Amino acid sequence: MTFYLQTARSYLLSHQFNTCETWLLGLHNEYLRDPDSEAETAAMAAGASALRSMDEATEQWLRKSPGSYAALMMRGQYLWARGRLARGTSSANQVSQAQWALIHESFGEACLLFHRAALTVKNPGLALSMIGRMVWIAGESVAKGLHFPNGQDWFGYGLSVDPASYALHAARLQSLRPEWGGSIEAMEKYVAAPERASLTPYGQQRIARLTKSVLGFYRAMFRGEREAGRRLIDEAIAAVPQDPLAYYWRVLVDRCDGRHQDAIQYSEKALALDPEYTDILWEGTQARWAQDKNDPLILPQLKRLVALGHEDAFLSLGDYLNTVLDEAGPAYDAWKKGADEGLALCALRLAEVAYGQGRGVKQDGDQTLFWFLRSYQLGWHGAVANAYWWVVQGRAPGYSLLKLAPTLIEAANVHDEPFSHGRLADAIEDQGLRYNESGKVWITQVPLADDPQGIQLYLDHLTTAAENSHAYSQVKLAQLYRQGKMVGKSFEEAEGWLQQAIEDGEGPVAANAKRLLAEMIQAGETKDSGSEEQVQAFQLLEEALEEAGDEDVAGRWALVGLARAYDRGLGVKKDRDTALKLAARAEKLGVSLPDELKHLSFKSNHSESIGRSLLMHVIFGPIALLWAFLVGLFGKRFLGKVIKWVLLAALLLFLLFFSIGAYQAWKNPKARSTPASTTPPVTSEATDEKPSLLDRVKKNAEKRKAQEAGNP
């Protein structure tokens, strides 16, 4: 099988289109003579790669020969692979709407090509089975609009012209799987369906094998019948050992059971039969990496996957060379090869790691920008948001904001990319960027507060980013509502956006949302700010400090919130010493304490302590000197020698302890009196009657999502 695939691709990539067409038609004729031959799988997999080189070659071939059966098939297979790449390996409910849109776009175009191919040959089973493959991944909707003769659908028409096509029946069986609206019972019923009688005996055997392997998988994975499911899959393998699909199901079950060696063994068998199963070799390689990054088989397997054209392998090979083996030059070569093949994430690595950090090449800001924009052109639309920071920080001298702005605006308004909306809002607020619908872009010196059109533009992009789970923008929008800047003041809106940012964000951004929400609770600005909420606010501040650390502004202000909590007993027992230490720690990190906490200020209390110390020295210093003079002058005459020295020693001890006390007052100043608290009395006891703050955060986030989806 590998030989068939590599031969077809070598003809295609060298633009030997006529030779490639002869080769593929030979495979098709071989299939017509013997529907059970290996030629069927080879013909279907020949063009199934989403690499840029395949895109360019198949597009050029189709332009040159628009009615060629082979050209239509190869171009359709490329689009099929592109759709699968967009689909990824995650479960269907984890695929985003943008991913589904790209899947349907690629599959819809591919279906049209396979439809045209089916009408150009006598027995179009291979072309129709490719439509079936897309139907079982994306549903019947991708095949709508295909008008086969006599009004038949793709399956009915396929059976009428090629009743012996195993691939066609397999596609139909796969479309009955539970995740596409079918059921296990429907699949079992299809095994005895009348139309299956048209298959060859071997085809009947393969369908039975396919049913057993799929049912075994579902019993093992979804019904918990692991051993019974594995036995069914093993029976399928024993029935048709040269069919790779059963091996694939066995690999999935073994991985879930932690039987990694068995999974590797079966994945190698499947791959030897069909290179299209590179995904299971890929997944096995990733499992090896996660288990032991020094496994000697990882590198050769990644190189093998690259040779087979697996799209994700280019990126991982570069990452492995860079992070595990510390070979920056070869890592650059791997990423460069992937970027040349049209892989957006490889171009992103060239920008962020290679040229951005100087790994494998000389650090170069302009090259970094070039590869960010190249990644954007290849489909990673968030790359232009990364490029924005390099431009505004002056790290790419050959680029300006005005030069970058049209791409940033396109990413936001055409591709609706959330990070680009957020960066565009930053550019409008911080850099004075403006644009209009006619495409004009300019920089203004007018402050945003004095520019109503700019404010509207800013709020539109900031709100769009926030509504699309951009946590940084959610925090900024919350602050605007809390302060009443550019929008009506609303603590409820501010609290809601902070709750959403906690759920959508991570790292310092989520930490900042937590400390801001905690501050609102401490200030009584949330709907509920009672004793239980104050305890939760204290926990949020601790989490914010742990997640952000002292180096981030969120962590520094979390110290202020914790100082407030200890000073006033908000959610924790009062502890003035701890409050002073936290406030001093925040001040040393550059935070200026708010007026309400000035009494905890190390700097102001330090100044007062020094003042008190100097005043005491001014008052008692001359008295002590006078006392020493009098003792020295009259002590021998009136007090005697022993008493004189005792008094001098007492004076020295007094001065010593006075100095130590003054130093302690300077080093550890005591707080001035605390202002009267407006916060209601708080205890650290929590009850189970009310939901916790974090529970309400999750509940409100679910409510927001339900409202966005149009549910009551």
Image: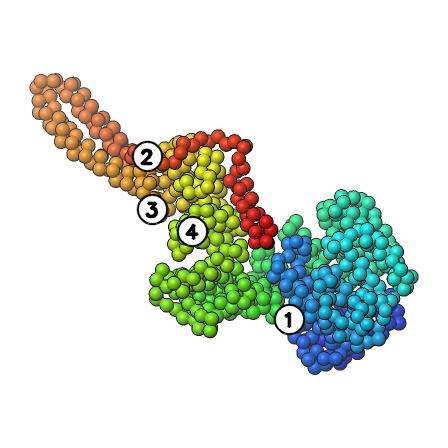
- 209 horizontally vs 712: left or right: right
User: Which residue is at a point 69% across and 75% down the rendered structure image?
Assistant: 58
Q: Calculate the distance from the C-alpha at mark 2 to the C-alpha at mark 1.
A: 69 Å
Labels 3, 2: front one: 2
Q: Position of residue 29 (x, y in %)?
A: 85, 74
Contact? badges 4 and 3 (CB < 8 Å): no
Q: Amino acid at mark 3?
A: Ser
User: Which residue is at a point 36% across and 46% down the rendered structure image?
Assistant: 591
124 or 14, nearer to the observer: 124
Q: Position of residue 236 (x, y in %)?
A: 84, 53
> For the residue labelled by badge 2, is the local secondary structure a helix, a strand or a loop?
loop
> For the residue labelled by badge 4, is the local secondary structure a helix, a strand or a loop?
helix
206 or 666, nearer to the observer: 206
- Tag 3 residue: 592
User: Considering only order in the chain, which callout, 4 or 1, is on the residue closer to the N terminus?
Assistant: 1
- Tag 2 residue: 676
Q: Position of residue 530 (x, y in %)?
A: 45, 35
Labels 2, 1: front one: 2
User: Considering only order in the chain, which callout, 3 or 1, is on the residue closer to the N terminus?
Assistant: 1
Q: Amino acid at mark 4?
A: Tyr
- Tag 1 residue: 52
Q: Indicate which disc residue 510 carries.
A: none
Answer above or below: position of 672 versus 181.
Answer: above
Answer above or below: position of 420 versus 119.
Answer: above
User: Considering only order in the chain, which callout, 2 or 3, is on the residue closer to the N terminus?
Assistant: 3
